């Protein structure tokens, strides 16, 4: 937690896993166990790679939390990670719908144009760069995808209502996919 801003919460660091506790366990003991598990999962090889990339564990966790909420499969996570890191590197807004759902608390992936204008440091439509902090507690697959992104020609992606991820190289292709898979559903 040493590279975490002072105002940050534990979100992102509470590793999602199966835990066994006695009925009289304290909240502090639960948090400690989850943090220790996170520490074990982030093995030295992963920490070295993060350092080699000149990123912080916190930045990786923020990215992993976005990926966790956006797509389901390992392959899609790696590609989306590549797209999002590429957008960051080119000063392009991330425009991650999951950040809007995080702000509004809605359990839907449908985001209105009005909602993309909400003034929040988590709004990746309004503000460039990573959001203020993680929006979920990502699993190991999402963490690894954020450390080892897959390079591609893609700049855009969307998830269909069935959970399939459609990747596009251009905004025009993305808009066509959006009309085909989302507007008619």
Image (spheres, rainbow, N blue to C red):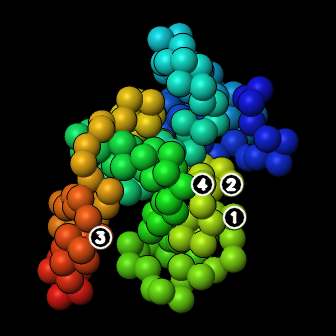
Asked if labels 3 and 1 touch by Cβ distance under 8 angstroms, the answer is no
State whether residue 12 appears in this view.
yes
Quadrant location of the C terminus in the rendered image: bottom left
- The relative height of residue 175 versus residue 41 in the rendered view (above or below) is below
Location of residue 102 by image quarter: bottom right
Residue at 38 percent across and 29 percent down: it is 148
SS class, disc 3: helix
What residue is shown at x 54% (from left), y 55% (from top)? 91
Of badges 3 and 4, the one in the foreground is 3
Which numbered circle lies on residue 129?
4
Of circles 1 and 3, the one toward us is 3
Mark nearer the viewer, 2 or 3: 3
- The residue tagged 2 is 132
In contact (CB < 8 Å): disc 1 and disc 2 = yes
User: Could you say which disc has been placed on residue 111 in the image?
Assistant: none
First along the sequence among labels 3 and 4: 4
Mark positioned earlier in the residue sequence (2 or 3): 2
Q: How crowded is mark 3: few (under 14 residues within 10 Å), some or many (20 or more)?
A: few
Answer whether labels 2 and 3 touch (C-beta < 8 Å).
Answer: no
Q: What is the x, y in percent for residue 94?
A: 48, 60
Give me the C-alpha separation between circle 4 and circle 2: 9 Å
| Quadrant location, the N terminus | top right
Q: Please name the residue that numbered disc 3 is placed on.
A: 171
Marks 1 and 4, how far apart at CA: 10 Å
Q: Quadrant of residue 70?
A: bottom left
């Amino acid at each position: 937690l040493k590279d975490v801003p002072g105002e940050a919460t534990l979100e992102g660091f509470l590793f999602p896993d199966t835990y066994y506790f006695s009925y009289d366990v304290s909240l502090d003991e639960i948090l400690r166990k989850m943090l220790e598990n996170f520490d074990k999962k982030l093995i030295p090889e992963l920490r070295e790679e993060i350092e080699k990339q000149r990123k912080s564990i916190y930045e990786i966790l923020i990215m992993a939390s976005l990926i966790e909420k956006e797509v389901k499969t390992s392959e899609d996570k790696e590609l989306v990670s590549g797209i999002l890191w590429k957008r960051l590197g080119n000063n392009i807004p991330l425009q991650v719908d999951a950040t809007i759902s995080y702000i509004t608390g809605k359990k839907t992936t449908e985001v209105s144009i009005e909602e993309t204008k909400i003034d929040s440091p988590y709004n990746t439509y309004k503000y460039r760069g990573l959001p203020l902090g993680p929006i979920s507690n990502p699993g190991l697959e999402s963490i690894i995808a954020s450390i080892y992104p897959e390079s591609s020609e893609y700049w855009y992606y969307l998830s269909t209502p069935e959970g399939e991820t459609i990747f596009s190289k251009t905004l025009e292709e993305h808009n066509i996919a959006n009309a085909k898979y989302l507007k008619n559903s």
